[in-house]
Image: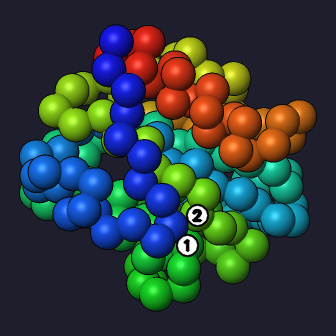
Amino acid sequence: MTAPVRYGPDDRLDAVLDDPAAGGTYVLVVDLSTSVSVEVGALGVREFPAGSYAYVGSAFGPGGFSRVDRHRRHLAGDEAGVHWHVDALTTRPEASFVVGLLAPGIDIECAVARRLPPGPVDAFGSSDCDCRTHLSMRSDVTTDRWATKLADTVATVA
């Protein structure tokens, strides 16, 4: 059991990881302050209720965990451009970054996603696997409490 590395809104990626370019699996925790309708690529317009979201992804490509930093910049309004499903959510002004949970060097994306409550949008972030979705949503617990539970889930799978 390996605890994930927590990457907060004010953290520098190179300060929390020895080698951010190495990559691994991540869980991006985002708050959505109000409900929104969002165009999500080929999935079309989807409804996202206000609440806390967890998106499970992998960062094994070029740049490794810099992908998570890119998501954080989206959520801060410092970067534009929609490339992945999650960008449709992270570019919304109603969304804010809470924490990234990083599992360096291991590919547990689908194992973690399958342990989370289903999100409001099927096939979100899972077009390259057979998971129902890689997006989960909770409105019944505080975001901080859910982030702790998510960290426990990642640690259990790792």
Q: Which mark is residue 35?
A: none
Using the image as rendered, state which of residue 140 and residue 117 is in the foreground: 140
Q: Are marks 1 and 2 in contact (CB under 8 Å)?
A: yes
Would you call the spot at circle 2 few (<14 residues within 10 Å), some (14-19), or many (20 or more)?
Answer: many
Under circle 1, the secondary element is: helix
In the rendered image of this protein, does residue 78 appear above or below residue 8?
below
Q: Looking at the image, which residue is at 36% across and 58% down? A: 68
Q: Looking at the image, which residue is at 39% across and 66% down? A: 11
| Number of marks present in the image shown | 2
Determine which residue is flagged by label 2: 97
Res 3 visible: yes
Q: Residue furthest front?
A: 15
Q: Looking at the image, which residue is at 65% across and 74% down? A: 92
Using the image as rendered, state which of residue 151 and residue 55 is in the foreground: 151
In the rendered image of this protein, does residue 111 appear above or below residue 42?
above
Give how far across and how far down residue 129 sits, in percent.
36, 26
Tell me which amino acid carries mark 1: Leu
Specify which label sits upstream in the sequence, 1 or 2: 1
Determine which residue is flagged by label 1: 75
Gap between marks 1 and 2, in whole Å? Answer: 6 Å
- Judge left or right: residue 117 versus residue 20: right
In which quarter of the view is residue 47 placed? bottom right
Under circle 2, the secondary element is: strand
Res 64 visible: no
Q: Dividing the image into 4 quarters, which one contains the C terminus? A: top left
Would you call the spot at circle 1 few (<14 residues within 10 Å), some (14-19), or many (20 or more)?
Answer: many
Give how far across and how far down residue 123 sits, in percent.
55, 35
Q: Dividing the image into 4 quarters, which one contains the N terminus? A: top left
Q: Residue furthest bottom?
A: 78
- Judge left or right: residue 131 versus residue 116: left
Tell me which amino acid carries mark 2: Phe
In which quarter of the view is residue 119 placed? top right
